[in-house]
Every structure is written in C-alpha cells, then in structure tokens.
Image: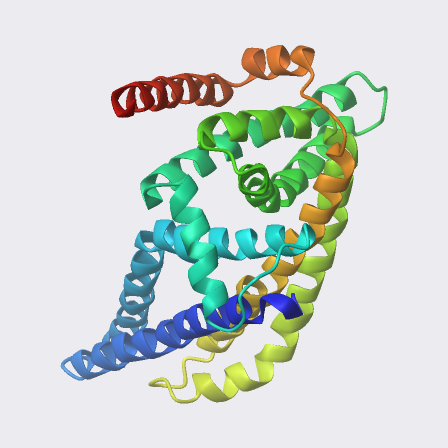
Amino acid sequence: MVQTMPFVLLRMAIYFGAALAYVLITGTGAGIGWGIGALGDDGFRGSATFFGGVIGFGLVAFVMYWLREYILYMVKAGHIAVMVELIDNRPMPEGRGQIGHAQAMVKERFAEASVLFAIDQLVKGVLRAITGLIRGVFTILPIPGARQLIGILHAFLKVAVGFIDEVILAYGMRTRATNPWQSARTALVLYGQNYAPMLKNAAWITIFVYGLTIILFFIMLAPAALIANIFPNGMSAMGVIVAIILAWSVKAALLEPLAVACLLQAYFRTIEGQTPNPEWEDKLEGMSSKFRKLKDRAMSAGQQDGTAKDAAS
C-alpha cells in the first residue's frame, strides 16, 4: 500500500472530495428548502428543509453512480495494475508516472471503460452463483435454525465477494492477457476450484474492514455533530448521515484497497501451479448464465482478434 502512495492519494482526493460534496450540496439543498419554507408555517419550513437536503444528497449520489464506470476504469483498475506489478517485483516508475503507467496497462487490456464495467458486472454475477454453493451445503445439514443461519451467512458472503471481483480482473493484468473476457473466465474457474479457502479469506477481511468502518463511524460522530449544527434548524439527524459519509470515504479510499491487496496475495498464492479444472468450468456453465455470457464474449473477441491479425498480415 505504501508503495502505491500516488494511487492512495488519488483515491483519498476522489472519495474525500465526494464526502465534501455530499455535505456541501446537501447543506445547500437544505438551506434553499429553509428559505422556501419561510413562505409557510414552522411545519412547512421543517419539511421544506428536509426535502431540500434529500434532493441535494440525491444529486450527489446520482453523479457518483454515473461516475462509477470511470472510477473503476481509471482508479480502481489502475490501482490493481500497480499492485500486480509490485507482487511480481516488476520495476515501477515513481511519482505520478506510476498512475500514467498503470492506466496505460488498463487501456491496453480494456479499450473502453464500458468493456471493463461489463466484465466486472458479469464477474460479480458468477461470484454470486459460487457463493450460492454455501447455501446448498448448509441445506443438507440437520442444524436447528439452519434456514435463518443460511440467510445470514449468505448475506454476509455476498458482501464479502464484493472485494473479489477486482481480484479476478487482476488475473488478466498479471498474465498480460489480450482477451479480457477469456482471462476473466479462467480466473473464475481457478477461483471456483478454490472457493472454500478464498471465501474464508474474504470473510475475515470483510469482518476486518467493516469492523473498522463501524469504529470510524462512532469516531466521526463528534465532528459530524459540529458540521450538522451548520445546517438550518440544526438538523441533528444530519450528524448521523455525515458520520456515515465520512466513514464511507475512509473505507473507500484506504480500507478497500488494503482488502484487495490482501486478497490478491492470497489468490495468487492459492492458484500457483494450478490449471483450470474442466469439471469446474462445466459446473459454472451449468449454474451461471453470466459465465456462459463471458464465454460468448470471449469467443467473439477471439474471432475479432483473429480477423484483425489476418488483415494485418
């Protein structure tokens, strides 16, 4: 993480900037609502202030949702590329050159942000299917209250695999794959045949990350309460929202890349020397339409590459 400091600083600038935007735009919306509320009684003013804040918060949330492809493409994937280079002890340029080098690696393998985003969404779908295997194992065990336990465990593992999709993307960067769809398929098969230790790693790391995030939330309540006093009518409830936003920004900027760095090392160490098991490939094709879609995209991309090479020759 220390060696990827340019990307850490970039993530901090983006996510802390987003947190600041949430606070400022929400406050501006609440202020506008408070001003409009002067046209009515106290109840109307309170409602106008509340809904003004909600609209401001929603605007920033919409912008962040719209930017998710760009952030994945330019920031998260670039950070993964740097980590992969460091794991393999490949020389990296220093300073801001690190960011340029990593983003060039991403563009080399994923021509457009939409391609990377599409692969990432398919990968998440396959990972959810693999996580469903845990549900199947527990349903055959005669455990009292098994249904409730399965529901809680499955919900927790769905959160845990949220970090693993970036590990799958890292496989293609490490192998210098020219067909990102096929490399994602291969990485998923390798993950599937090692899903037990990988999910165990992901579960512990998730507990660590979200445990720290909860602690950060309580720490942030004090400064958040001070910020909430700036809002019209105090809006004490805003203190909780601001604390959540601040804790989320630290999690996204610092804790999430730390989790990915840990899982990258665990994944590459686990699959070292292994080859994809055809039985697992057949199993994933049977259980996940997303996996079958990856196969179709991989074949299509392979045919396009072959056509391009023929034309060049």
Is residue 59 or residue 183 the one in the foreground? 183
Which residue appears farthest toward the front when viewing the image? 313
Total tally of numbered discs in the picture: 0
Residue drawn at x 67%, y 30% is 191
Residue drawn at x 38%, y 52% is 68
Residue 179 in the figure: left or right of residue 61: right
Residue 140 in the figure: left or right of residue 180: right
122 vs 68: above or below = above
Colouring style: rainbow
Is residue 82 or residue 45 the one in the foreground? 82
Specify whether residue 130 is in view: yes
Q: Indicate the position of residue 193 as horizontal and vertical percent values.
A: 72, 23
Q: Indicate the position of residue 179 as horizontal and vertical percent values.
A: 45, 29
310 vs 210: above or below = above
Residue 32 in the figure: left or right of residue 113: left
Residue drawn at x 60%, y 47% is 163
In which quarter of the view is residue 151 placed? Answer: top right
Q: Indicate the position of residue 150 as horizontal and vertical percent values.
A: 72, 31
Is residue 242 or residue 71 the one in the foreground? 71
**Quadrant in which the N terminus appears:** bottom right
In which quarter of the view is residue 135 placed? Answer: top right
**Quadrant in which the C terminus appears:** top left
Specify whether residue 41 is in view: no
52 vs 282: above or below = below
Q: Indicate the position of residue 47 as horizontal and vertical percent values.
A: 28, 71
Is residue 258 or residue 304 the one in the foreground? 304
In which quarter of the view is residue 89 placed? Answer: bottom right
Residue drawn at x 33%, y 41% is 114
